[in-house]
Amino acid sequence: MVKKRQSKRQNHKYTVANAYWLALVLIIGISKLQAQAFLNGGLEAKTGTACSVDVTNAIFNNRIEHVIGLGVVSKLDLLTDQCGLGVPREGNYFVGLQAEDGKTDAIAIRVDQTLQSRKYYYLEFFARLGESDTPDYNLALGINSNPNFHGELLYTTRDIPQGWRRYEVFFRAPGNGEYITVLIESKGKTRIFVDGFKMICPGLDIGRDTVFCEDVRKEIVLPEYFSDASWSDGQTGNKALFTRPGTYGISANFGSCALFDSITIDLDPSLCTCIFDLPNIISNSSATNGQLMVKSNCKFKSFDLSIFDRWGNLVFAANDPESIWSGQGAGGRPLETGVYQVLVEYALQDTGNEQIRYKYQELVLVD
């Protein structure tokens, strides 16, 4: 969990409630911060296995557990640092695959739990190029429940250096699968080495602690790949709105990863020295009263202006303090009359404090 500044200006009721919730996270949550796992992502051979170069799928499968050779070429390598073909990226062994004249070589690596259709996952692995007589080759990852086939494509790359490189793959499973498959293709003859397959958890970051000069209104929206979001004040789902000061925690899932974060929202007019001059009403048909422009006496280190309609849809955004809004939407189309919400998010120059601050105001758009 990211450690953040604890505000001294919190409503006591919220402080106690959230402290209790965060304590529960620490007590029961840390043990859940685990992704699904490859059963042999390190590609470790059975004890005592000697260097195995250009062995058939059958021999390869007999010398390693939870990894299955399935390529057409059927020339796999199971190597150590004593085999003359380099050193493992981790552990004691690594695997080599060969492709020849359009024929593929492939392996399937089993995971400990079924990867579920339409859920998001995140994995890493290492690869390096052994040799190739053509630049026309690539390495691909797939997912399948049947280890005898490559399955549905997840990722492909042909940017493979001669030294170990780390690759990250973020994907949404197109179907259920118990295996991640690794396949290489080449129009000539190519050998590629792989090692260190891991399912990993991404970070969950709901933003920096924030201070409002006046009315607290902080909306947090999580990307769709996080699921089962639960907030410490009882809200659920990937969108939450906070209108009172306090420290708020969230738990959410990513695949089998259980993730946690928190944010402190403060209300302190004395910290916000900016004076804003924002209109309360503009007309989309008036030349004199038809524009919204943020006027302020402050110098901004960062600045973001957002305007939302009454349904919460973003209709205008800018990061220039001199930007002007004339009541128009995409393509210069005049928007419907009604109430809009104006949100200014900013940090000040020359204060030594990079904390994000907010100015919120309603605006009426008329004809």
Image (cartoon, grey):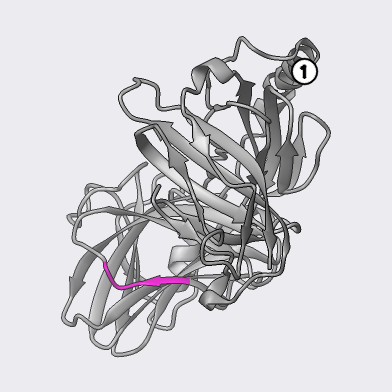
Viewer-closest of 141 and 266:
266
Outermost residue, front side? 288
Residue drawn at x 57%, y 40% is 204
Residue drawn at x 31%, y 74% is 98
Q: Please give left or right for residue 331 compared with residue 120 in the image.
A: left
Residue drawn at x 20%, y 55% is 163
Residue numbers of the magenta segment: 155-159
Residue where numbered disc 1 is placed = 14
Task: Kindly tell me whether residue 293 is visible in this rendering.
Answer: yes
Q: Position of residue 64 (x, y in %)?
A: 48, 56
Viewer-closest of 205 and 33:
205
Viewer-closest of 24 and 158:
24
Mark 1: give few (<14), some (14-19) or many (20+) Cα within 10 Å.
some
* Above or below: residue 127 compared with residue 334: above
> Within the image, what quadrant is residue 29 found in?
top right
Task: Locate the C terminus and report the quarter of the image it occupies.
Answer: bottom right
Task: Kindly tell me whether residue 67 is visible in this rendering.
Answer: no
Q: Please give left or right for residue 129 compared with residue 352 in the image.
A: left
Viewer-closest of 344 and 146:
344
Q: Position of residue 91 (x, y in %)?
A: 37, 41
* Above or below: residue 31 compared with residue 79: above
Residue drawn at x 52%, y 66% is 287
Label 1 SS:
helix
